[in-house]
Amino acid sequence: MRRHPIQFIDVDADNLRPPSYIDRAFRHSFFSWAGFRSIIAEHTVAEHNALQKYSRDCFQVVEIGVAEGASAIALRDGMNPRGNLYLIDPYHLSRARHLNFIKRTAKRVLSNTKNPRAFWIEAFSHAAAGKWNTPIDFLLIDGDHSEEAVERDWDDWHPHVVDNGIIAFHDSRLFPGGWTSPTWGPVRFVDRLFRQTPEPEWQIVDEVDSLVFVSKRINSI
């Protein structure tokens, strides 16, 4: 399986200086698709490793919000090679929809993902949920970051997660030197549901940088 270099968020380095115009321009996905730069992750190395850890040996893995595919690579490398990886993203934010280099980049870097098998669902998560009927071992919620959208993803998808399955919320936690803030939708939702008035059937099992991992309690019903 071909390995693709990934540019992770380096919290210390990224806080030293603001990006230059050239740096910002070079972040355009065209440059990754064309092979001029690594794919850009929206997460840290520690988060990447945590995604691999908690998806380890899972058979049915779902990611909401794929972007250039860096987190999908973590899930692919962690999960059972005989499993199924479902990648959900409408890819609607590209200024040139017919080119859409973000989608092209993700599909290029994951093009050799035959074990596990990758299934692309180019739709909004709520639309995909309406047709969903497969049990899920691991779910990554990293789509629309408004509090309402995160809550809708939770409502739509958590009933499909199996007992002892894991749901990971990205950008949902404050951490030293991090990029999140108390007003971010994922932070507000996770705080409300799992900290202020804890969800009785679910519990936080780990927190790594901006990621929060929750799991259904054993014998919760």
Image (cartoon, rainbow, N blue to C red):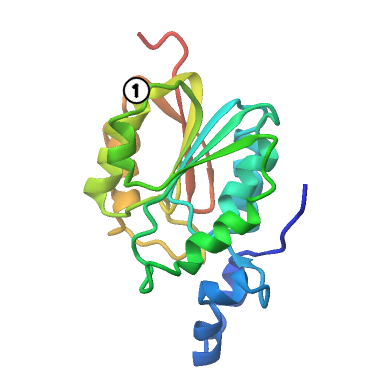
Q: Nearer the viewer, residue 173 or 144?
A: 144
**Dot 1: what SS?**
helix
Above or below, 91 against 189 in this view is: below
User: What amino acid type is highlighted by mark number 1?
Assistant: Pro
Q: How many marks on residues?
A: 1
In x, y percent, where is residue 96? 38, 73
Tell me which corner region of the image, top left, top right, bottom left or bottom right, holds residue 16.
bottom right
Q: Residue at x 54, y 90 (%)?
A: 22
Q: Against 184, is 124 above or below?
A: above
User: Which percent across, then down, holds residue 206?
Assistant: 53, 37
Q: Quadrant of residue 141?
A: top left
Q: Position of residue 139 (x, y in %)?
A: 47, 35
Horizontal side of residue 146 vs 211, given as left or right: left
Residue 67 pos. (x, y %): 48, 58
User: Considering depth in this image, is 202 or 156 the residue closer to the camera?
Assistant: 156
Q: Is residue 117 left or right of residue 180?
A: right
Q: Going by the image, does 45 lie left or right of 164? A: right
Residue drawn at the location 35% of the way across and 62% of the way down:
181
Tell me if residue 30 can be seen: yes
* Residue underneath mark 1: 159
Instruction: Residue at 49%, 91% (x, y): give it.
Output: 21
Dot 1: within a 10 Å radius of its alpha carbon, few (fewer than 14), some, or many (20 or more) residues? Answer: few
